[in-house]
Image (cartoon, grey):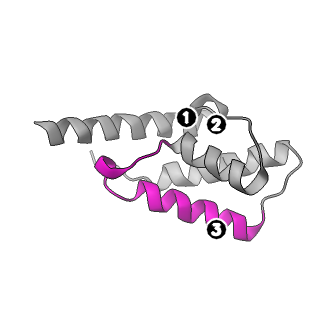
Amino acid sequence: MTYSPIPLIKGLIHDTQEYLLSLNIEISQKENEILELTLKKEFTKSALIQKNTPTQVVNKFLSEHYNLTNKLTPRSFSEDTFFLIMQWGVHKASEMKKSSE
């Protein structure tokens, strides 16, 4: 099965927007683009050289752009995005296992 990070990236962006709206914060187009580029930069490279988890990337973005200190976990996202985060983890573990064989 081929893995694509695009659904994960889209889910993280959508759910981050929803989270910010729940705090009465509207994400600007520019910040939305920054988040998208940041996620793409991390998750379109080889799983073996990815240094952060999806929630780490989002939490860093929220801290840097909105000074938010609450830390999101995979369960903070929608069920669909939670599943995509878990799928990413399985893919990363599988790639790491393959590289060590």
Q: Which mark is residue 77?
A: 2
Q: Is residue 22 left or right of residue 49?
A: right
Residue at 53% in and 53% down = 9
Q: Toward the viewer: 43 or 83?
A: 43
Number of numbered discs overlaid on the protein picture: 3
Residue at 10% in and 36% down = 101
Which residue in the structure is indicated by mark 3? 33
- Against 26, residue 34 (above or below) is below
Q: Residues within 10 Å of mark 3 (few under 14, many from 20)?
A: few
Q: Cβ–Cβ below 8 Å for labels 1 and 3?
A: no
Magenta part of the chain: 28-53
Q: Position of residue 49 (x, y in %)?
A: 32, 51
Q: Of label 1 and label 3, which has the lower sequence position?
A: 3
SS label for mark 2: loop
**Identity, as a three-letter code, of the amino acid under mark 1:** Phe
- Against 81, residue 17 (above or below) is below
**Identity, as a three-letter code, of the amino acid under mark 2:** Phe
Q: Position of residue 32 (x, y in %)?
A: 68, 63
Q: Which mark is residue 46?
A: none
CA separation in Å, label 1 and label 2: 6 Å
Q: Of label 1 and label 2, which has the lower sequence position?
A: 2
CA separation in Å, label 2 and label 3: 19 Å
Q: Cβ–Cβ below 8 Å for labels 1 and 2?
A: yes
Q: Position of residue 52 (x, y in %)?
A: 46, 45
Label 2 or label 3, whichever lies nearer to me, is: 3
SS label for mark 1: helix
Residue at 89% in and 48% down = 24
Residue at 70% in and 48% down = 63
